[in-house]
Image (tube, rainbow, N blue to C red):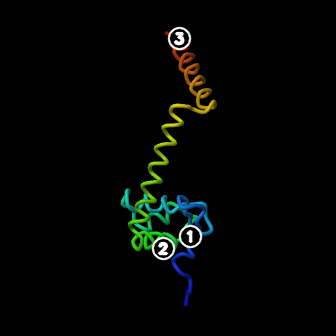
Amino acid sequence: MNTQTLKDYFYVISPNDIRIQGTRIGIETILNEYINCGRSPEEIAHTYPSLTLEQVYATILYYLQNQESVTEYMKNWLQHGYTMREQQRKNPPLVSEKFKQLRKARQSFKNNESQILN
C-alpha cells in the first residue's frame, strides 16, 4: 500500500512557485494544459516524459481539492508572465537587438542579391 500523501508530490519553492517533486516542472504547466487547453492527463504525461501519469493526476487532484487557492496561484502566474513579456518588449535584451539587426542585414542582402540576378 502506498502511504504517500498528496502534498508529497510537490515541493514549494515560494508561494508563487510550486513544482512537481523530482522535476523542474511547475503545477501551472500541468494545470494550464488541463484547464486551458483541455488536454487529458494521459496526453499531458505523454507530452512531458519526465512526469508520470500519477504525478499528473496528483496535480489535478490537488487543484480540485484547493480550487480557490490554486485558481489564485494560476492568476498570479499568468499576470507574472504578462508583466515579464511587457518588460522584455519595452527593454529587450541586447542579444534580441543583435538578432534583429542580423535579420535586417540578411533581408537586405537577399533583396540586393535578387536585384542583381534579375
For residue 106, above or below residue 80: above
Cα separation, mark 3 vs mark 2, equals 62 Å
Residue matched to label 1: 10
Which numbered disc, 3 or 1, marks the residue that appears first in the sequence? 1
Cα separation, mark 1 vs mark 2, equals 9 Å
Label 3: state its secondary structure.
Answer: helix
- Residue 46 in picture, x, y percent from top left: 49, 64
Label 2: state its secondary structure.
Answer: helix
- Residue 25 in picture, x, y percent from top left: 56, 60
Neighbour tally class for label 2: few under 14, some 14-19, many 20 plus, Cα within 10 Å: many
- Residue 53 in picture, x, y percent from top left: 50, 72
Residue matched to label 2: 58
Neighbour tally class for label 1: few under 14, some 14-19, many 20 plus, Cα within 10 Å: many
Assess whether mark 2 and mark 1 are in contact (beta carbons under 8 angstroms).
yes
Q: Is residue 52 left or right of residue 78?
A: right
Label 1: state its secondary structure.
Answer: strand
Residue matched to label 3: 117
Q: Quadrant of residue 4?
A: bottom right
| Foreground pick, 48 / 58 | 58
- Residue 67 in picture, x, y percent from top left: 39, 68
Which numbered disc, 1 or 2, marks the residue that appears first in the sequence? 1
Among all residues in the image, which is located at the extreme bottom? 1
The amino acid type, in three-letter code, at marker 1 is Phe
Q: Quadrant of residue 63?
A: bottom left
Which numbered disc, 3 or 2, marks the residue that appears first in the sequence? 2
Neighbour tally class for label 3: few under 14, some 14-19, many 20 plus, Cα within 10 Å: few
Query: Disc 3 or disc 2, which is closer to the eye?
Result: 2
